[in-house]
Amino acid sequence: MKKIRILLVLGWLWILSAALAIAHDGLAVHLVQVDASSYPEITLYVGVTDATGQPVGNLQKDDFSITEDGKDVDITDFAGVGDVRSVDIVFVFDTTTSMAQEVEGMKQTSIAFATKLEQTGRDYCLGLVDFGDVINRVLKGDGTLTDNAGEFRDWISSIRLAGGGYDIPENSLGALQEATQMSFRDATQKIFILITDAPPHHFGDPNDANVSFDDLTISLGYTLQTLMEANVTVYVVAPNHQDFREIVQETGGEFYNIHGDSDFTDIIDRIGTLISQQYRLTYVSPRPTYDGTRRDIRVIVGESTGTGEYLEKHLLNIRSNWLIGSILLTPLLLALALPPVLTQVSDRHRGPEMAPVGGADLAPAPSPGPKVVPKGTCPHCGHPLRARAKFCSGCGRTLAIAPAPIGFVTCPHCGNTLRPQAKFCSKCGQRLER
């Protein structure tokens, strides 16, 4: 009987493990955002969806595993659905006249959007930037956000539509940049939801309603850099434009075609669901060196993997690893070693005058003001010298030679050929100036 019970327990365990494997089959893991602002502590925001695209919100810490640059890491903190975690969300809203339907839809769904966040443990704050060709308003005026869904709905209700149309670009890039300047809470996830029915303006566009676009920062590249530095994830509800696609791809958000089949309120509801069903996972980098390198991350759930990366932002330094240290030290070592090497090479090419004889030290370099040694003995070793010798044949040291007096080849007055060191011309008798 005991054996039968054991077999039954093992059978149930096998069925349970198989069910879990099946449950994790066909999942899609989305590494939405990587926050390295507290490096070497890294915080990840991860979404998991099933085969139908619906968020999976019942996973636990043990369902996840993480690697950085191929090395397994321990999850030091985990927050799932129902666990309190903060999120700051800014709606970046095109408020031109063609957006009337979307503004009305946002009024209807704003309370439900905030309620969904609250019910799933998201400690939320909301903000609003509304724009057309220019930035119209930032709410609140001091750049702070509100944790009151009713106040946010009042902001939406106060929108006054003006100008614009489907075929006119609007300054959505500038509005996204403006949103990054708002006052966000520390250690919180930051999400922007861009809503527009027009393509973006760029630097150099012709004047639009007396608005000029001569600011170099109105560009996709600068906007992406600003968003990435602020650790923002952007969800975009807009026309199918390449700029919007790239913003979503680079920041880990989602794109929704505003001219598609989905109703606008359904899109906002789906975004709210995705945000509310995300997981927060924290780990410590297995290579906590400040080397300015890019790190690859993999988040694994069952057989599914989500990938991402982050850049360790510090400058390269010798603590990185032996290879980086060697590369950084090489120029310094060369600078230190090169002068002695050049000196040795120069000495070998100078000949015997610098070579020591009988174990004697090399002679110091002659001082300025050469000493005349026309004949006699070597001042270093006393060896007899030949007249005007440059080197001592006994010790090999250099003998400083006085420069020859200034002389002339021909007389500067009459052109007569002169003898060496002549003081007067033998033809014209003129004195030769020295």
Image (cartoon, rainbow, N blue to C red):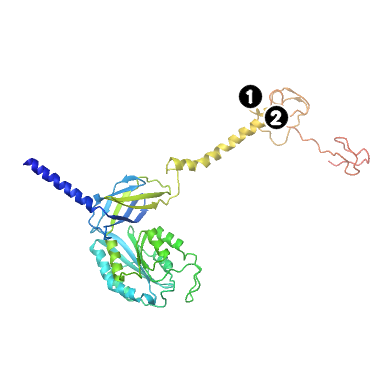
Looking at the image, residue 184 lies above or below residue 434: below
The quadrant holding residue 368 is top right
Image location of residue 385, percent across then percent down: 75, 24
Q: Position of residue 28 (x, y in %)?
A: 29, 55
Report x, y in % for residue 78: 26, 53
The residue at which mark 1 appears reads as: 360
Q: What residue type is labelled 2?
A: Thr
* Element type at mark 2: loop
Residue 17 visible somewhere in the drawing:
yes
**10 Å neighbourhood of mark 2: few (<14), some, or many (≥20)?**
many
Task: From the viewer's perspective, tell me whether residue 295 is left or right of residue 17.
Answer: right
Q: Quadrant of residue 409?
A: top right
Of the numbered discs 2 and 1, the one sitting upstream in the chain is 1
Front in this rendered view, residue 266 or 370: 266
Q: In this view, does 158 lie above or below 143?
A: below
In-front residue for pair 405/199: 199
| Three-letter residue code for mark 1 | Ala
Q: Mark 2 highlights which residue?
A: 398
Tag 2 and tag 1, C-beta contact below 8 Å? no
Q: Left or right: where does residue 102 sit relative to residue 429?
A: left
